[in-house]
Image: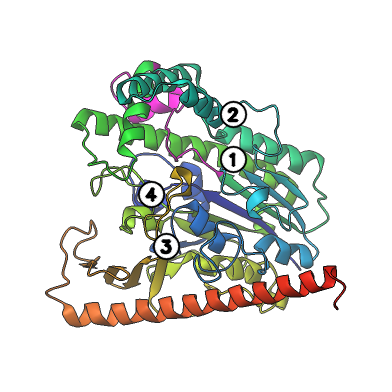
Amino acid sequence: MSQHVLYITVDSIRADRVGFLGYDPPTTPRLDSLAEKGTVFTRAMASGIPTYFSFKSLLGGVYPLSRSSDLGVPPAVTTLAEAFEQRGYQTAGFNAGNPWLTRSHGYDRGFDTFRDFLSDDGERWSFTDVLHGLQRLVPDSDLIRNVAGQTVRTGCAVTGRVPLEPAERVTDAATTWLETEADPDRPTFMWIHYMDPHYPWVPPQDLLDRFHDGSLSRFELGRLWHAVSYLHGPDSDGSVSESDLTAIDALYDAEVRRTDNAIADLLDVFDSIFRLDESVVGVVGDHGTELADHGNFSHAPRSLYDEVVRVPLALRGGDFSETRIDEPVSLIDLPPTLLDASDPRDRYAVPDSFEGGSLSGDDTSPTITNVTYGFDPARENEAGDEMLSACVDWPWKLIDREETDYRELYNLEADPSERTDLTGDESEVAEELVTAIERHRSWAKRRQRTATERRRVRDRVQRLRRQGAI
């Protein structure tokens, strides 16, 4: 019998800030309870960062750069939602306003119901549009822009307006669909993406008070928002006072708890309709984020330290027993894993386009993430096409930048904070991991060339058809 599947993804959530992976402050009590009854992967690694690379794996089932360096799901691949749709599932997707996970990037494919709170919500106040409009009116002066930016952000913090959809509203939309539109007699695939741990952090006051001893006014939240906006850029040195960093940590933890509360409400409603005991539930982060760990506040593809690539991952239901897996695993394997778990009788019927394998297998090959170095479409950054890659073969991790001499090697067991580069001391290990990275790069580029050639052939055939030549 096909099982229902609830797929929960959380933006910018670090593995080291959730309870079921050892964090003491109570950020994730409901997720901890869920994880206790399932399989926890303690060393899950994003296939790429940030969102526009990671989700090509999480919903597209392909490595970020194997088909193209473009954003969005490659047109030729079968999405996870389409695969469930082909199995007769009713499908629904809810994205909390992340601009990279919209219809224009192909993420609605396969969903009967799809809400991104952007293209489907015309009356929604658009923070980004307002900011861009104000920027056009502000003179080209760093001082004036700084004052204007702080004024706008402080006003938004005071009024509680943020550019991303809050967890409560996203859960409300999903539970309304469950209670009024979903057919309880059909197998269901629901995907929901929460954004609250992503900067800016403006949590409800009652949640902030749980994680911060002092009083932080809404004006202080606006000031910190403005400060982090400058620390988020590529030229930032990450300089921040200890008191501000303490406050930022508390804001981040409060937003994680806010997300956990919203997930708790979602799970309660889902359980009342479909029963969690008869469902597969996956909870995963798309990537983490820096909190001054290596001198920045970002998750742009300029570094691949664990704070940005290691994410929480827990799976409950199906064949997932109560256990912990310490071997490194890749998020590229999640789509086939969810399909396998949903129906044991159809275990191997996964799309040919998927490039990962089920986590229920025993693959022990190195785990790789790769991104286009420095590429930031939000800043209209015309970066080159060189890859920044990381390879984990426990306990070793190598970070390598293509076409440069930039390499870093860490022993994650002895040095989990990645402070001591061992490239010079462990040259043989470094070369082995470089070989694995180069093998993957070569494979990815062959896939890119193949996909490009197929597009050329398809476009030529369509052109000839329009001309009546064939």
Amino acid type for the residue under numbered disc 2: Ser
* Residue that protrudes farthest toward the left in the picture: 425
Residue picked out by circle 2 = 126
Alpha carbon distance from label 4 to label 3: 12 Å
Q: Is residue 349 left or right of residue 416?
A: right
Residue picked out by circle 1 = 96
Q: Residues within 10 Å of mark 2 (few under 14, many from 20)?
A: some
Residue picked out by circle 4 = 299
Alpha carbon distance from label 1 to label 2: 13 Å
Which span of residues is magenta-colored?
Answer: 194-218
* Quarter of the rendering occupied by the N terminus: bottom right
The answer to whether residue 201 is magenta is yes
Residue drawn 59% across the image and 73% down it: 452
Residue picked out by circle 3 = 371
Going from the N terminus, do you reach mark 4 or mark 2 first?
2
Going from the N terminus, do you reach mark 1 or mark 4 first?
1
Alpha carbon distance from label 1 to label 4: 18 Å
Describe the element under mark 3 as helix, strand or loop: strand
Q: Residues within 10 Å of mark 3 (few under 14, many from 20)?
A: many
Going from the N terminus, do you reach mark 3 or mark 2 first?
2
Alpha carbon distance from label 3 to label 2: 29 Å
Describe the element under mark 2 as helix, strand or loop: loop
Amino acid type for the residue under numbered disc 4: His
Please say if the residues under marks 4 and 2 sit with CB atoms less than 8 Å apart: no
Q: Residues within 10 Å of mark 1 (few under 14, many from 20)?
A: many
Residue 348 percent location from the top left of the image = 66, 79
Q: Is residue 422 left or right of residue 357?
A: left
Residue drawn 53% across the image and 36% down it: 261
Amino acid type for the residue under numbered disc 3: Val
Q: For the residues carrying marks 4 and 3, which lies nearer the camera in this image?
A: 3
